[in-house]
Amino acid sequence: QVHVVESGGGSVQAGGSLRLSCAASGSTTSGMPFGFYCMAWFRQAPGKEREGVGSVYTGGGTPTYADFAKGRFTISKDNAKNTLFLQMDSLKPEDTAMYYCAAGPRERGKSCSYLRERIYNSWGQGTQVTVSS
């Protein structure tokens, strides 16, 4: 069972930055090593549906981002440490939300897009990000 734990949330003023971390541990039920996993960030604001922020295939390739994240958020990874990061710059009050990390095995021939939320079967408890104006 794969476990993911987020950290790094907090309160920041508009225009500020935060870096979230997601540490993955445990064994992969699919038998796939972490180096061949899909990992993604999602967020959910009070009273709103959960939405994808961005995703990446740990085996290579560039991350994909939701429109609101493009140019402000950056996903990176450290495969050796099984850790995913989300660098958030130029934060806005509307970025206030609980941010979740998720992981799931990549399906052969399919993308890791956050739009394919069903492939993500390991979720963290979330870390709160609050941006004040």
Image (cartoon, grey):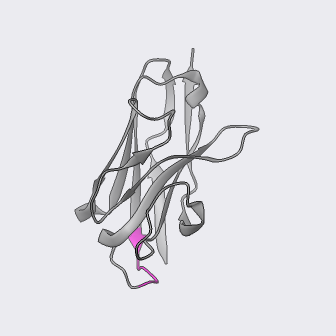
Horizontally, residue 82 falls left or right of residue 126, namely left
Residue 5: give x, y in percent of width and height: 47, 58
Seen from this angle, which residue lies furthest right? 47
For image coordinates 41% across by 48% down, the residue present is: 64
Quarter holding the C terminus is: top right
Residue at 51% across / 32% down in the picture?
Answer: 68
Q: Residue furthest top?
A: 133
Q: Residue furthest front?
A: 109
Residue 31 picture location, percent across and down: 39, 85
User: Residue 117 vs residue 9: left or right?
Assistant: right
User: What residue appears at the point 76 percent right and 38 percent down from the top-left corner?
Assistant: 47
Who is closer to the viewer here, 94 or 129? 94
Asked whether residue 123 is drawn in magenta, I would say no
Q: Is residue 42 left or right of residue 29?
A: right
Secondary structure of the magenta portion, mostly? loop
Image label count: 0
Kindly identify the residue that appears in the image at 56 percent across and 30 percent down.
95
Within the image, what quadrant is residue 56 found in? bottom left
Picture coordinates of residue 4 (x, y %)? 47, 62
Find residue 10 and report its horizontal and vertical position in percent. 50, 33
Task: Classify 62 as above or below 93.
Answer: below
Looking at the picture, does residue 98 appear above or below residue 38? above
* Whether residue 3 is situated above or below residue 95 in the rendered picture: below
In the depicted view, which residue is nearer to us: 3 or 67?
Answer: 67
Report the magenta residues as a range. Answer: 25-30
- Residue 121 lies in quadrant: bottom right
Front-lying residue, 56 or 100:
56
